[in-house]
Image (spheres, rainbow, N blue to C red):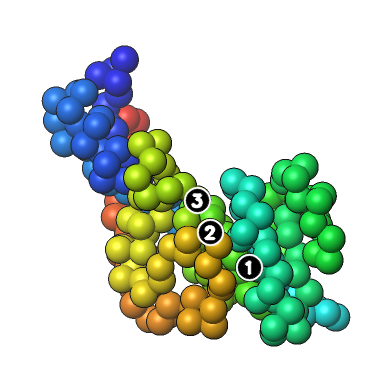
């Protein structure tokens, strides 16, 4: 059924190779749709204008629950006098005392992240938004490196795209000050602007062709 599409693209080179093999022609690699908006556009759309909080806090958002990462996050937060806030998306988080647990929809998530002093995540989109909002972040490995169905590659591809110096923290390791930083802004913005331009040109070309 893929052959019925006039244009095909993929988010990762690995996916593009799979689709290309199935359809018999090249498939474009384009950025995740969240990257098509600039930081300013996200701020204006969701009213993200104030980073001040009565109590400075750090934020943790994990797609896959991992007690070791939660413990490392809490220890980092305490060292830096930050209130540890965890987005409540797993029942097992209720077993952790001493952390602030917050249920959050998409808009709540953006507001919480925008105001955070530090961020720990294993989420691809968490990495994207921390990068867009210029929040110091540490990124955890979600799956073992040798696991067949691992999804670490999408974050690794993003790091490669922006020439990030970040590493994927192995659960059980402490989160050090060397892990929690913002990549140099200039090269990141340049890389994202180039990818955004490529994606918009791709969309414009194919939508215009469809309208003819």
- Left or right: 75, with 35 as reference point: right
Where 190 falls versus 200 (above or below)? Answer: below
Q: Residues within 10 Å of mark 1 (few under 14, many from 20)?
A: some
CB of mark 1 within 8 Å of CB of mark 2? Answer: yes
Which residue is identified by label 3? Answer: 142
Q: Residue at x 82, y 50 (%)?
A: 94
Instruction: Answer with the quarter of the image where residue 22 lies.
Output: top left
Q: Residue at x 31, y 15 (%)?
A: 1
Which is more foreground, mark 3 or mark 2? Answer: 2
* Marker disc for residue 134: none
Q: Residue at x 66, y 55 (%)?
A: 67
User: In this rendering, does residue 185 appear at all?
Assistant: yes
What's the CA distance linking mark 3 and mark 1? 15 Å
Residue 16 in the image, given as x and y percentages of width and height: 25, 38
- Left or right: 66, with 34 as reference point: right
CB of mark 3 within 8 Å of CB of mark 1? Answer: no
Residue 11 in the image, given as x and y percentages of width and height: 35, 45
User: In this rendering, does residue 200 appear at all?
Assistant: no
Which residue is identified by label 2? Answer: 171
What's the CA distance linking mark 3 and mark 2? 8 Å
Which is more foreground, mark 3 or mark 1? Answer: 1
In the rendered image, the residue lying farthest to the top is: 1
| Residue in front for this viewpoint, 184 or 74 | 74
**Label 2's element?**
loop
- Left or right: 154, with 104 as reference point: left
In the rendered image, the residue lying farthest to the front is: 172
Earlier sequence position, callout 3 versus callout 1: 1
**Label 3's element?**
loop
Residue 193 in the image, given as x and y percentages of width and height: 36, 66
Which residue is identified by label 1? Answer: 72
């Amino acid at each position: 059924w893929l052959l019925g599409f006039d244009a095909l693209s993929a988010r990762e080179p690995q996916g593009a190779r799979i689709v290309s093999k199935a359809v018999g022609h090249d498939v474009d690699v384009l950025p995740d749709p969240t990257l098509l908006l600039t930081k300013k556009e996200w701020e204006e759309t969701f009213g993200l204008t104030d980073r001040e909080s009565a109590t400075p806090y750090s934020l943790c958002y994990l797609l896959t629950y991992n007690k070791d990462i939660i413990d490392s996050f809490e220890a980092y937060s305490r060292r830096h006098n930050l209130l540890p806030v965890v987005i409540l998306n797993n029942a097992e988080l209720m077993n952790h005392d001493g952390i602030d647990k917050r249920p959050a929809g998409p808009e709540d998530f953006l507001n919480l992240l925008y105001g955070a002093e530090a961020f720990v995540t294993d989420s691809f989109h968490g990495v994207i938004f921390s990068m867009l909002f210029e929040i110091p972040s540490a990124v955890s490995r979600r799956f073992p490196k040798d696991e067949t169905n691992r999804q670490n590659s999408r974050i690794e591809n993003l790091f490669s795209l922006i020439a990030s110096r970040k590493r994927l923290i192995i659960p059980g390791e402490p989160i050090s000050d060397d892990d929690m930083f913002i990549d140099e802004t200039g090269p990141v913005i340049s890389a994202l602007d180039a990818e955004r331009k490529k994606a918009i040109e791709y969309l414009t070309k194919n939508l215009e062709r469809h309208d003819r």
